[in-house]
Image (cartoon, helix red, strand yellow):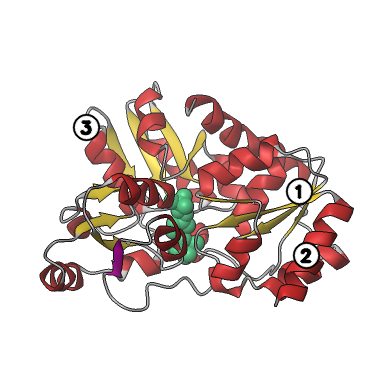
Amino acid sequence: MSNLYDEIKALKERKNAIILAHYYVPDPVQEIADYIGDSFYLSKKAKETQADIIVFAGVLFMGESAKMLTPGKKVLMPDRTADCSMAHMGTVESVAQVRAAYEDVAAVCYINSTTELKAACDVCVTSSNAVQIVKKLPQHTIFFTPDRNLGHYVSTQVPEKEFILNQGCCPIHEDIEPAAAAAAKTAHPGAVFLVHPECRQDVLAMADYIGSTSGIIQYAAAAPARECIIGTEEGVFHELTMQNPDKKFYPVRPGQCCDNMKKITLEKVRDCLRDETNEVILDETICRKAVRSLDRMLELAK
Ligand code: 13P
Ligand code: SF4
């Protein structure tokens, strides 16, 4: 194992590369990363970096977003089949239909989406900035795609606007059910309940805190509570336990696991960096349009 770490470190130095990792990838990959974070933080890091190569330890939409924000850089994916299933649950046609039916509408695209969908929308958001950005949009009607759960959560925080929600969702977060949340609360009566806004609205209604993966980690560190029930993918437990060795963290139920994120291994990180394989290549025309949505997100989130 340590040889693999040393090999990756040497490759990073020799090639002026950095590794960006999402909190959901396996622990050893989080440990070798230069930056670990939520989708918004990692997009900003991709845009800022002076490195020549970015290895994106995450799912495809993350690597594609990094490539759009830094077109001159080489972005490599450790596993090109690691994809977010929700990213494909929104269509360009549905955006066109809503635009035809409503005059004063903004198409808002969760960053967990394809490049084509980003190109068709007006602005991108992540779970950590969606409320802030939607509040700032001049349009009264919001078409939120692809995630109905994040879209519904935003609608509760921005009641002055009207929302049309695309009916996609993350299978992992959708599977966290209220009955399991109630059972976890009964089993751990002193614990606070922290959830990701990709969870169902009946689960969000039971939460003490709702936020992105980074938001959950920050809240858990600052909260006086010694125990937390966590309603998101289990990869966050690595950072939670590192930052708070004296606190206890429980999943709502076993198996809160994104199989695509778990495809990212140290061996694949090493191989793609050594051989410069699985480079993200995007169609230039679509990319030019899609990056406008990402740049607008970065601007409105300031
Ligand atoms: P964050 O932006 O909160 O890290 O979420 C990304 C994601 O894929 C959640 O399922
Ligand atoms: Fe996509 Fe859900 Fe996996 Fe996040 S946890 S990457 S939303 S499938």
Q: In the image, 26: left or right of 81?
A: left
Region of the chain picked out in magenta, as a range: 247-251
Q: Secondary structure at mark 1?
A: loop
Viewer-side residue, 136 vs 185: 185
Q: In screen coordinates, is 8 left or right of 259?
A: right
**In the picture shown, does residue 28 fall above or below 153?**
below
Element assignment for label 2 = helix
Mark 3 closeness class: few <14, some 14–19, many ≥20 residues within 10 Å:
few
Question: Could you tell me residue 144's position as x and y percent?
Answer: 39, 43
Could you tell me how far apart the alpha carbons at marks 2 and 1 are, in whole angstroms?
A: 30 Å
User: Residue under circle 3?
Assistant: 159
Question: Callout 1, which amino acid?
Answer: Asp
Disc 2 to disc 3, how far (Cα)? 48 Å
- Name the one closer to the observer, 118 or 265: 265
Q: Are discs 2 and 1 less than 8 Å apart at CB?
A: no
Residue position marked by numbered label 1 in the rendering: 283
In reply to whether residue 248 is colored magenta, the answer given is yes
Q: Which quadrant of the view contains residue 242?
A: bottom left
Amino acid type for the residue under numbered disc 2: Ile
Q: Quadrant of residue 25?
A: bottom right
Q: Quadrant of residue 186?
A: bottom left
Mark 2 C-beta closer than 8 Å to ligand 1: no
Q: Which residue is identified by label 2?
A: 8
> Which badge, 2 or 1, comes first in the chain's sequence?
2
Q: Nearer the viewer, mark 2 or mark 3?
A: 2
Q: Say whether disc 3 or disc 1 marks the residue closer to the N-terminus.
A: 3
Q: Nearer the viewer, mark 3 or mark 1?
A: 3
- How would you classify the magenta stretch by its main secondary structure? strand
Q: In the rendered image of this protein, does residue 19 appear above or below residue 295?
A: below
Looking at the image, do the residues carrying marks 3 and 1 touch, with CB atoms under 8 Å apart?
no
Where 169 sits versus 184, above or below? above
Q: Quadrant of the N terminus?
A: bottom right
